[in-house]
Every structure is written in structure tokens, then in C-alpha cells.
Amino acid sequence: MNHLLLFDIDGTLLRGGPAKKAFESAMESVFGTAGAIAGHDFSGKTDPQIARELLGAAGLSDGEIDDGLPALWDDYLARLEVDLPRSPMTVLPGVPELLGHLEQLDGVAIGLLTGNIVQGARLKLGSAGLMSHFPVGGYGSDSEFREDLPAVAIERARRNWGVDFDPGAVVVVGDTPRDVACGQHEGTRTVAVATGRFDEVSLAAAGPDHVLPDMADLQGTVEVLLQ
């Protein structure tokens, strides 16, 4: 294996779906409030970080939040599993073709780097028929802090493929400046795609190695990812 490609999910591979509503309903059920969720910035954050920000601003202590998180995730996942079939996520242009192509290439390993808790990631990707592409990943359930996740994903990749991936051979692919920053924190290459809330100019300001408008151009995307 010469390359390890770590993909974000929301805004990078998929968009839309019922996750935010399921999260809001679960917060209200478990904690009695979802805080000021309507205007909250979710971009590039982990699920635990989002929950802590919203609940802390609503007056809950860290201890109260920590005590309620297991019940929150159980409630959220149950709602998400029910809601996904009737409010499916949209697969972004070029993604199935890209993942299928990458899987056929010698020396290329694929994984996830996402703020979603692990089972939320599996439900989202499974509903879109994409989960089988990703045997490893770093998830929001591994750490509240996104900058911790590349190291987690790289270690899981090492165990899965028996390869010590140098950070310079790893590419973090995402749609927000926080995706770029977490890759830079670990010393990986970074590729930003303007398929989420941030345009190419905003993403370029974060300093990634490359910015793509999307991943619809198969040949061009592969060339950038495997440089």
C-alpha cells in the first residue's frame, strides 16, 4: 500500500438526510433541550463536540452532558435508522465511480475520517450503499476533538493492512476548513472539495494541498488524490 485516502462523509460523500432532525429530537428527549440548534454551525465538528457546545450554552455542566451522552447516542441512532429510508441522503456526483475505481488500484487503501459517531457513519453510508468501501476509519466516537482522528484512522489502517503509513502518504479529503486543519495537524496531505457549505475560495484560504470543485471528474480527482 502506497496511499491511504481518508474521506469525510457529510458534504464530501453525501448530503442531506434526516440526521440533524434526529439529533435535535434525541437531544430534546434525553436532555430536555437541543439548545440554539437552528443557527448552530455543525461544519467539520464531531458529534460529541456539537452536543457539548449546544448543551453547555444551554447551561448544562460537563458532568451532566457526559452522563447523558450514552442515552443520547442510543436515541439518536434509533431515530436515524427509522428516518433514513423515508428521507434518504443524496450521494454526491462522482462518488460511487471514484470509490469503485480506487478499490481496483494496487497500493491504494480507503478509509473514513468523520465527526460522525461510528454507528451513525455506518447507517448513513449503508443507506447509500457505500459502507462496504470503508473497512477502517476515525470517528467522532473515538474523540471529541477532530484533530485526534487522523492518528486513530492511520493506526487502524496499519492494523488492517499491515502497513506503517507515513503521514505524507495519507490524504485527508473533506469539505470544510476543519477537515483541512485536522489533516495538517497530523502532517498528512489535504484535499478540500467545494461540495458543502464552503466555496473554493474559502477552502483555499485554509491552505489545503489542493481544492476541487467536486469529485465528478474521475480522472482529474484520482490524479490529485494520488500525487
Image: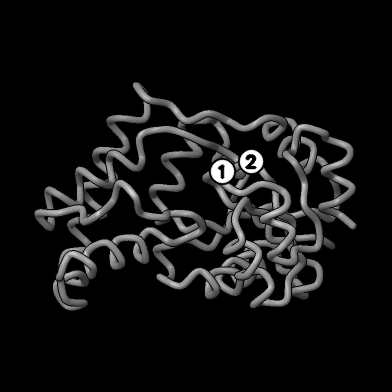
Which residue is depicted at the point 88% across and 41% down? 220
Residue in front for this viewpoint, 70 or 36: 36
**Residue 215, horizontal then vertical, whole percent:** 74, 38
Image x and y of residue 110, in percent: 69, 52
Q: Is residue 185 left or right of residue 207?
A: left
Callout 2–callout 1 Cβ contact below 8 Å: yes
Question: Residue 24: x percent and y percent?
Answer: 24, 46
Quarter of the image for the C terminus: give it.
bottom right
Graded by Cα atoms within 10 Å as few (under 14), some (14 to 19) or many (20 or more), the crowding at tag 1 reads many
Q: Amino acid at mark 1?
A: Gly
Query: Which residue carries the number 1 mark?
Result: 11
* Mark closer to the chain start, 2 or 1: 1
Would you say 204 lies left or right of 34 here? right
Q: Residues within 10 Å of mark 2 (few under 14, many from 20)?
A: many
In the picture of the structure, the residue carrying the numbered disc 2 is: 195
Can you tell which quarter of the image residue 153 is in?
bottom right
Which residue corresponds to the image point at 55% horizontal and 73% vertical from the top-left?
147
* Amino acid type at image mark 2: Thr
The answer to which of 194 and 132 lies nearer the viewer is: 194
Of helix, strand and loop, which one carries label 1?
loop
Residue 23 image offset from top left, x and y in percent: 28, 47
Q: Considering depth in this image, is 188 or 41 the residue closer to the camera?
A: 41
